[in-house]
Amino acid sequence: MGIFKRMKEDMDVVFEQDPAARTYVEVFLTYSGLHAVWSHRLAHVFYKRKLFFIARAISQISRFFTGIEIHPGAQMGRRVFIDHGMGVVIGETCEIGNNVTIFQGVTLGGTGKEKGKRHPTVKDNALIASGAKVLGSITIGESAKIGAGSVVLKDVPDHSTVVGIPGKVVVQNGYKVRRDLDHHKLPDPIEDRCSQLQNEIEALKEEIMELKEGKANDNIHL
């Protein structure tokens, strides 16, 4: 496919995904996600030719103007749509398939200083919602959905929905996996610990009151 047909295809995706898009001129000039994808394609060409400095320079310039950081080594398929995009980070060994949608604040990152494949693989038609963190050399299956704010550390099967911290599969192949998960009531370890401490304080207060009452009774008998 020629470069101009590819660019036209990228803009068509914007119209399919974003109801706010009005004209090709507006999309071409103002959509930072589109600019980041185009810049990445150029940077990736230099990266494959081992011109790493030029590739990183293009990547950093794109990051400055778009707020989206895509490592030149990342591999991206066709019709990838980055909506809004501010704060998106995509690591060096990421592999992103076709028709993938990524929202603002998403991180496709590693978990440490390991070598080799250390970033996620995202298969075709996946959707990763705002603020989600997908970390490590894991696979996000075809047509999978990652909920906003989720932290995903394990493979996600095809046609699944994942939410929570850490991410858990709640829907697979159209069927609920867990029926007891309220998305607005995710576990809060800090709140749980504070409640535990409060209960301990109340128990200590009761013991102190019992000791005081026992001492008062002893003084009366004396």
Image (cartoon, grey):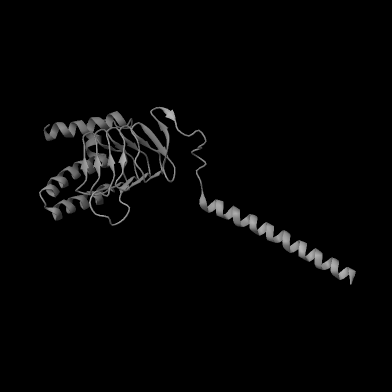
Residue 201 x, y percent position in the rendering: 65, 59
Q: In which quadrant will I find the N terminus?
A: top left
Report the number of numbered marks: 0
Residue 113 higher or lower than 127, as above or below = below
Q: Nearer the viewer, residue 152 or 16?
A: 152
| Residue at image point 68% right, 57% down | 202
Q: Nearer the viewer, residue 120 or 5?
A: 120
Q: Nearer the viewer, residue 179 or 56?
A: 179
Image quarter of residue 138: top left
Residue 76 x, y percent position in the rendering: 22, 40
| Residue at image point 85% right, 66% down | 217
Q: In which quadrant will I find the C terminus?
A: bottom right
Q: In this view, does 99 lie to the left or right of 169?
A: left
| Residue at image point 31% right, 31% down | 17
| Residue at image point 50% right, 33% down | 179
Residue 62 x, y percent position in the rendering: 22, 48
Image quarter of residue 21: top left
Residue 165 x, y percent position in the rendering: 44, 45
Image quarter of residue 207: bottom right
Residue 156 higher or lower than 12, as above or below = below
